[in-house]
Amino acid sequence: MIADIESWLAGNRNFERGVELYERYGTNPALKILFASGASPFSTDKLFKELTALCIKAKPKSAPKVEKPKYTIDDLSPALQREFKRKGDLFKQASQMHSDLFHEQNQQRRADLVAGIKSCFDKIAAIWKKCDEYIRDRDNQDNTVSGLIQKRNNLRTRISKARKQELADKEQDLIAELKLVEAKLTTLENSVRNG
């Protein structure tokens, strides 16, 4: 299928041959009737667009490579954690505006919706950038006393959250994580005292 359509697209684009291809591979009965009625500037252009679309749909799509995040929300400062959580609200706003865009008739309002969607995604990108910069800076500060103090404070927060979760769930893996984080905290506190 793809080879036939690609050769037609790359060749001289004979209208009759294109109609044969659309009859064989196309699914829209109204377009089949339009193309069978003969060549016109409109039908020739429409045939080209439809066969191009069929060719694109038929090509296998490779799945995008998804990288695992290098950090979790617990690795961020409390202020960044609040911003990180704000991303979900921004995405919901953008989705709602996108939904409203389909029903809006007023061109000015449509332009405002598009600008709002772009603004939401720009804010989301800025939050990701802040988080990435924070993690990069935090990783570079691990050997300084202030970096160790900051890391110690973050670990204390994680311990507190894990304890609350431990009381609620009584899950063994949380207890194990709690012990691991407490050991890290002890090591960091010793480093700070000796540093």
Image: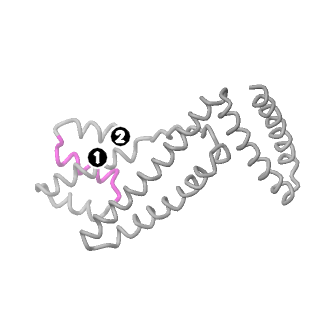
On residue 52, the disc is 1
Vertical order, 87 against 179 (above or below) = below
What amino acid is found at the position of numbered circle 1 in the picture? Thr
User: Where residue 122 sits in the image (x, y, percent)?
Assistant: 41, 51
Q: Is residue 125 magenta?
A: no
| Among the two numbered marks 2 and 1 on one chain, the one whose residue lies closer to the N terminus | 2
Residue 143, given in percent of the width and then of the height, sits at 67, 26
- State the extent of the magenta-drawn residues as a range: 13-27
Q: Position of residue 47 (x, y in %)?
A: 22, 52
Instruction: Indicate the quadrant where residue 154 lies.
Output: top right
Closer to the camera, 63 or 122? Answer: 122
Residue found at the very far left of the displayed protein: 41
Q: Hey, what amino acid is under mark 2? A: Ile
| Label 2 packing within 10 angstroms: few (<14), some (14-19), many (20+) | some
Give the prevailing secondary structure in the magenta stretch.
helix
What is the C-alpha distance between the residues marked 2 and 1? 10 Å
Give the SS element for disc 1.
helix
